[in-house]
Amino acid sequence: MTGQQQQSAGGVVLDLAHLETQTMGSTDLAREVLRLFLDQASELMARLADPAERRADVAHKLVGSARGIGLPAVAATAAALEQALRDGGAGAVELAPLVDAVRQADAAIRAYLDGEG
């Protein structure tokens, strides 16, 4: 790892310095946690689209996962969604910003895993 950041027009997508710290410099561990995040994010996003779910709790789980591996845009967007849901906006919340943030994170992670990061 090089301790860099992958950015988009909206800011830092993948903070590799944070990821490196969290994985104690282990590239193998970094790759493993990023793959796990891809799987988890897919599951959590599907659950967020289901009004029968406890969506604030699902968003909270995504916040923690994203913060843990250096995805600040996903963490911030998921935190905003979580707050909106907890404030009673269960029916009127907009998922599009989070969908966009997760798509950007997915692309950054896949680029990293493919050796472009």
Image: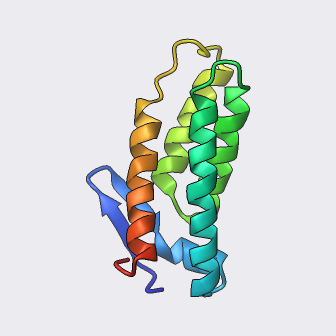
- Please identify the quadrant where the C terminus is shown: bottom left
Q: How is the image coloured?
A: rainbow
Give the vertical position of 108 relative to 91 (above or below).
Answer: below
- Residue 52 image position (x, y, % from top left): 70, 19
**Closer to us: 76 or 111:** 111
Residue 11 image-quadrant placement: bottom left
- Residue 45 image position (x, y, % from top left): 57, 38
Q: Is residue 17 left or right of 10 when viewed as pictured?
A: right
Q: Is residue 3 left or right of 26 when viewed as pictured?
A: left
At 55% across and 72% down in the image, what residue appears?
A: 18
At 51% across and 58% down in the image, what residue appears?
A: 71
Number of residue marks: 0
- Residue 31 image position (x, y, % from top left): 57, 76
**Closer to us: 35 or 76:** 35
Give the vertical position of 80 relative to 104 (above or below).
Answer: above
- Residue 84 image position (x, y, % from top left): 58, 23
Residue 82 image-quadrant placement: top right
At 47% across and 29% down in the image, what residue appears?
A: 95
At 47% across and 38% down in the image, what residue appears?
A: 98
Give the vertical position of 109 relative to 29 (above or below).
Answer: above
Give the vertical position of 78 relative to 115 (above or below).
Answer: above
